[in-house]
Amino acid sequence: EDQVTQSPEALRLQEGESSSLNCSYTVSGLRGLFWYRQDPGKGPEFLFTLYSAGEEKEKERLKATLTKKESFLHITAPKPEDSATYLCAVQARTSYDKVIFGPGTSLSVIP
Amino acid sequence: DTEVTQTPKHLVMGMTNKKSLKCEQHMGHRAMYWYKQKAKKPPELMFVYSYEKLSINESVPSRFSPECPNSSLLNLHLHALQPEDSALYLCASSLAETYNEQFFGPGTRLTVL
């Protein structure tokens, strides 16, 4: 069965303290892996798409990487405005390319 | 225009009411989605429309009825809902169903009394 897990469930960082969020997946053929940011009570905001192992994408303080079994979202020198829930989602080569979301990591960055 | 809009932002309804949620995008996307999200949980797929035709129905109860009048609009008709249906309802769109960089709207917060 296709599955996506994320760790940790919650993470508290001091401003400027770099860290990484993990997304592990088990799918029958990966079509794409997506990272989203979601603020409370709002819709998810698209961040990155990764398609193949070894691929990396960067945007400001965020860098996403992909291996055959997991993806990491690296946050360098985070600021309080980076506080949000980060969702990982995968699209599998199933009969209808369904997107499966992980449970998310809640990030809090303390000034 | 690079956004997905949803109306209303908030909705409170009784179990006997009929109401509708509306979603609109003008990005030329041909796939549109409805998700349900409960607190501290990820979005849960309900329906997918591809080229204005329903392509996925994730075994959603018939009290939820989707409609896609044209390529820019998506509606979700609600009837005889239960309190457990209270949630954030999210609309999303993507270029096509196989290109799943989905762009989400801000959601409608639904409360069923």
Image (tube, coloured by chain):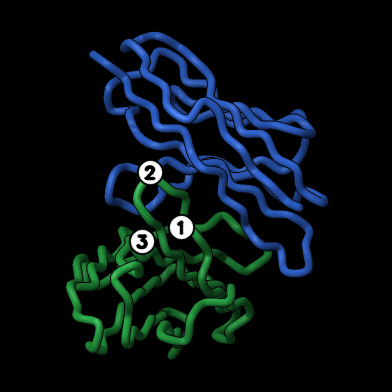
Chain colours: A blue, B green
Nearer to the camera, B1 or B16: B16
Position in image of residue B83 (x %, y %): 29, 70
What residue did someone put label 3 on? B105
> How many angstroms separate mark 1 from mark 3 (CA)?
7 Å
Viewer-closest of A80 and B57: B57
Q: From the top left corner, tell me how far across and down residue A23 is, in percent.
A: 61, 33
Q: Chain of mark 2?
A: A
Say above or below: B43 vs B33: above
Which residue is painted at 58% across and 84% down in the image? B54
Which residue is depicted at the point 72% across and 43% down?
A51
**The numbered mark 1 sits on a residue in which chain?**
B
Q: CA distance from mark 2 to mark 1?
A: 12 Å
Tag shown at residue A38? 2
Task: Determine if residue B30 is in view.
Answer: no
Q: Is residue B53 above or below residue A77?
A: below
Disc number placed over residue A88 in the picture, else none:
none
Quadrant of the rendered structure where residue B57 is?
Answer: bottom right
Q: Secondary structure at mark 2?
A: strand
Q: Which residue has dot 1 on it?
A: B103
The one nearer the camera, A60 or B82, is B82
In the picture, which quadrant includes the C terminus of chain B?
bottom left
User: Tag 3: residue type?
Assistant: Gly
Callout 3: helix, strand or loop?
A: loop
**Residue type beneath disc 1:** Phe
> What residue is shown at x 62% (from left), y 57% (from top)?
A99
Indicate the quadrant containing the N terminus of chain B: top left, top right, bottom left or bottom right: bottom left
- Residue found farthest to the right: A29
- The answer to which image quadrant residue B77 occupies is bottom left
Do callouts 2 and 3 mark residues in contact (Cβ within 8 Å)? no
Q: Give left or right: position of B112 versus A5.
A: left
